[in-house]
Image (cartoon, grey):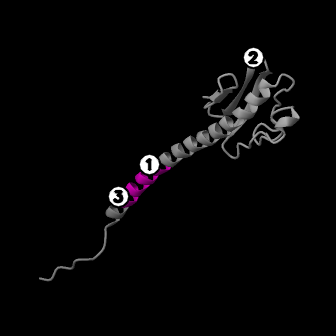
Amino acid sequence: MKLNYKKGFTLIELLVVIAIIGILASVVMTSLSSAKTKANRASALSSAAGVMPAIVSCADNSTATVNAPTNTSIGGGSICSDSSNVNSTWPSLGSTGYTYSVTNFTATTGSTFSVNSATGANITCNSITGSCL
């Protein structure tokens, strides 16, 4: 008696493989989303930390004041009202999803500003301590 064996995969086998590939793809997408969030925060933190020397220099000058950025997400505008810091401008935050929030600009108490995100992962910088957290 001759048996007829068909070559190939059954429908169940193919569906199982497709399900496994779908599960693996969802795990990879979750990991990539987390990495993108961390990269955006690192980029915003780097921009905020780069502004600190100009703010400290401006705060040390009793006749100068710290200006707010012209656009909270794009940045721009001079950081200090003093003409000696003419090359110091607020950097762009790009497409990180963060925006500037500036408050408390006085030479005696120091200047603080925040870089805020919609997710609540905020970065606060202080010119007295010279740090961003």
Amino acid tagged 3: Val
For label 1, count other residues whose C-alpha is less than 10 Å away and answer few (under 14), some (14-19) or many (20+). few
Q: CA distance from mark 2 to mark 1?
A: 48 Å
- Which residue is at 46% across, 51% downward? 28
- Which residue is at 68% across, 36% downward? 48
For label 3, count other residues whose C-alpha is less than 10 Å away and answer few (under 14), some (14-19) or many (20+). few
Q: CA distance from mark 3 to mark 1?
A: 17 Å
- Which residue is at 85% across, 27% downward? 64
* Residue corresponding to mark 2: 109
131 left or right of 68? left
Label 2 secondary element: loop
Numbered label attached to residue 16:
3
Most distant residue in the bottom direction:
2
User: Which residue range is magenta in the image?
Assistant: 16-29
Along the line of sight, which residue is nearer the eye, 79 or 76?
Answer: 79
Q: Main secondary structure of the magenta part?
A: helix
The reply to whether callout 2 and callout 1 are in contact (CB within 8 Å) is no
Residue 70 in which image quadrant: top right
